[in-house]
Image (spheres, coloured by chain):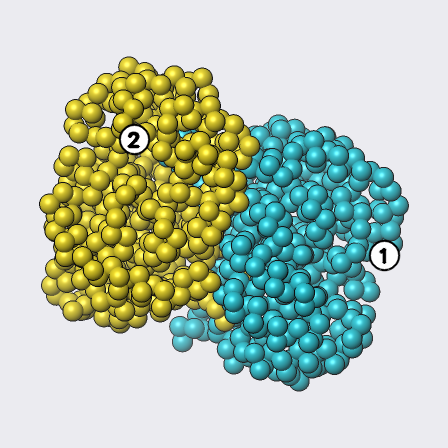
Chain colours: A cyan, B yellow
Amino acid sequence: MARGRISRLSVRDVRFPTSLGGQGSDAMHTDPDYSAAYVVLETDAGDGLKGYGITFTLGKGTEVVVCAVNALAHHVLHKDLKDIVSDFRGFYRQLTSDGQLRWEMLLCFPSQIGPEKGVVHLATAAILNAVWDLWAKQEGKPLWKLLVDMDPRALLSCIDFRYITDVLTEEDAYEILKKGQIGKKEREEQMLMHGYPAYTTSCAWLGYSDDTLKQLCAAALKDGWTRFKVKVGADLQDDMRRCRLIRDMIGPEKTLMMDANQRWDVPEAVEWMSKLAEFKPLWIEEPTSPDDILGHAAISKALIPLGIGVATGEQCHNRVIFKQLLQANALQFLQIDSCRLGSVNENLSVLLMAKKFGIPVCPHAGGVGLCELVQHLIIFDYISVSASLKNRMCEYVDHLHEHFKYPVVIKQASYMPPKDAGYSTEMKEDSVRKHQYPDGDVWKKLLAAQEN
Amino acid sequence: MARGRISRLSVRDVRFPTSLGGQGSDAMHTDPDYSAAYVVLETDAGDGLKGYGITFTLGKGTEVVVCAVNALAHHVLHKDLKDIVSDFRGFYRQLTSDGQLRWEMLLCFPSQIGPEKGVVHLATAAILNAVWDLWAKQEGKPLWKLLVDMDPRALLSCIDFRYITDVLTEEDAYEILKKGQIGKKEREEQMLMHGYPAYTTSCAWLGYSDDTLKQLCAAALKDGWTRFKVKVGADLQDDMRRCRLIRDMIGPEKTLMMDANQRWDVPEAVEWMSKLAEFKPLWIEEPTSPDDILGHAAISKALIPLGIGVATGEQCHNRVIFKQLLQANALQFLQIDSCRLGSVNENLSVLLMAKKFGIPVCPHAGGVGLCELVQHLIIFDYISVSASLKNRMCEYVDHLHEHFKYPVVIKQASYMPPKDAGYSTEMKEDSVRKHQYPDGDVWKKLLAAQEN
């Protein structure tokens, strides 16, 4: 059904001044400005449909991603959408091995700025997210439903298996998807009825006072939340106090997770978490460098006897890293990110590898639009791949949804499947205009105030 | 001795149209344009000394690195050079955990565009390379000599040990450097007399015809080269023919290495190299994805019985990856790169880890200026760290040296230690002006010709 030729690609630097968020933290100026490189694709199909794609960033540096999107734009412009999606694997490969970064050239000298990591991969994600949004809109389906309805072979034709065939061949993947067909209809109905379970990170940021923490936690309990994540890693005594406070409030039955945001070296992570084990966390997230697969494996090995799993993934820059985390038993919870990996295409390969290794996927979300996007992937995962909710949940952070045209719907601590066509990536034009950096109204005012 | 405040940072996009190199290949248009983001630091010291720093890129995308350098510039501007180098570890940490990408912020939400990999890390390298060049110039020493003369504690104060303490503590590193003091003077004299052994990659690019290959190989033999690298991986029959041809020409005693530039999946790499084993390669370089530590370990395990080692590193984006390659026995030859890692600082940590694991370092070079820079690091490595030449050599590619003010000097297939002060990073101003992209004369002409 895909139709039209891509006639225009625009990309904008959109920043929300979240560092002024007013939670009263005295370290406010060190907070990030949640931002996005925001891509819009237009076609000559005459149907008025556009594709919207984002990748999430943290303020400064967004201009670098915008720059990279422009450097990649020529791969998309003047292409027929039909040609792109009918050979999506080929298109993915082309984009991730860009022109002067291409294979023939890699044989002379490998790329030094990409491929499949860092800024260039983020730019790839933004563009591909827009392609998927456009395609789903043309099909008149929310992205998750587009994926659920796709024939297994068609799904596989979107995936680049390069570098992962030692753990997952196309045939392995096909078997998984074929099995996933059984009971699919029931699971889809179940999702439409009850949604996908979520957990909240909104209660326990590191900068919050104990009072704020208590207040937010009480409110979340009242709203029906049963799974809570707390940030740790800056000061052990402080962590002990805050974890005790939360565990006392939520009781022994509800789920507590901890997140160290790469704070520790390997031995330090083990030592620190042994101290926090008494608060019964389900997992410790990002205990050390996201590049340290063997480090995560060592930490997992030390913490499993304490009943604590390791969770990671939001910073893992491609499927090769996830492959190794799985091979090395380095994680017990796998956290995909909709904007860091190469869009739906690469996330599909990770969902399938996780299924093969029997590791639950618990997506990372928050930021700008990450909840909006990743809900599609995890709902698809449940219906067509994992077929299980055991130890599974999707992160939820309650902010910036008001800028999206199709914001997430949370009911009883669950993501309700989106019903609008597309990938929920479209932002309100008014929000975009106001928050464009540096010439949107919001920034003009802030920057002028800074100068005075 | 460091003096002056950084008063100016400029960065330029310099590209050499090497894709038009005229080797007669019919796939010429797919070749890369070797390029650099070129940073110049000026101070208010009034001594006329400037610091020059580069990072190597492949044409398209250089503008993204330039963009990232500008985003990081504020860390360097208006700083005293003395303050930078007297707390180089702190400065390194600051630069790699930039402002809105900083630690306090990471606790709220981790960076999505850096840190310590990709474009942002390349930009960091360019800036830090300029700082080291400036410092060495002010000290009136070539960089290798500045390093050799530094007190072990001072050297260690340049290194960020974060994320590597599980294999190398500061005390381990100190022990290594202290041992390296023994015989240092003799090794320095030896280097000045005979230079550091090199190997050539200039003979056997994949695009060359057999005749060209024979010609170049004969010329290299005549020039005294004894170590040769050949590119493989596109077509097995073609590889067999070319490897046989070279092995026949150089005889059984000289050294042959092979480079697959990430061409294969893991099982494919083992299968392919089993076929090429008869030509007795010392190593296979980059058999698969540079991110695949466990893949390299599997390949190593399969190939060691065949007498073939695995070499990798030019694409490894930080010390955490090298740490794991060493931990996993994934390589037998470690290839540092002067422009991909975080400059001298991060390379020091890798040299020390390699020493601890007893793995020889054989630097990657070529590109734009990589030979000029990395010779300093490997000469230092020999004099102060490894104290051995066994199985060690530095890559050499014979091009673009004419654009550098202090080009490498090769004598009898060895790098002769640079004698001019600095890091050999300075390019001829005339070359820079002509090759600036897109408004240098060379590009104006090429782009105009393209339009006609």
B363 vs B430, left or right, is: right
Q: Position of residue A250 (x, y in %)?
A: 76, 76
**Separation of residues labelled 1 and 2 (CA atoms):** 66 Å
> Does residue A98 appear in this view?
no
Secondary-structure class at tag 1: helix
Quarter of the view holding residue B385: bottom left
Q: Position of residue A259 (x, y in %)?
A: 61, 67
| Identity of the residue furthest to the front in this view | B305
Q: Position of residue B412 (x, y in %)?
A: 15, 34
Q: Position of residue A90 (x, y in %)?
A: 58, 30
> Does residue B399 appear in this view?
yes
Q: Residues within 10 Å of mark 1 (few under 14, many from 20)?
A: some
Residue named by callout 2: B255
Residue in the foreground of this view, choosing between B173 and A412: B173
Q: Are the numbered discs 1 and 2 placed on the same chain, yes or no?
A: no
Q: Is residue A84 above or below residue A187?
A: above
Image mark 1: chain: A
Residue named by callout 1: A194
User: As shown in the figure, which amino acid type bears the numbered disc 2?
Assistant: Thr
Question: Which quadrant of the rendered structure holds the C terminus of chain B?
Answer: top left
Residue in the foreground of this view, choosing between B247 and B260: B247
User: As shown in the figure, which amino acid type bears the numbered disc 1?
Assistant: His
| Identity of the residue furthest to the bottom in this view | A211
Secondary-structure class at tag 2: strand
Q: Residues within 10 Å of mark 2 (few under 14, many from 20)?
A: some
Whether label 1 touches label 2, CB < 8 Å: no
What is the number of the mark on residue A433?
Answer: none
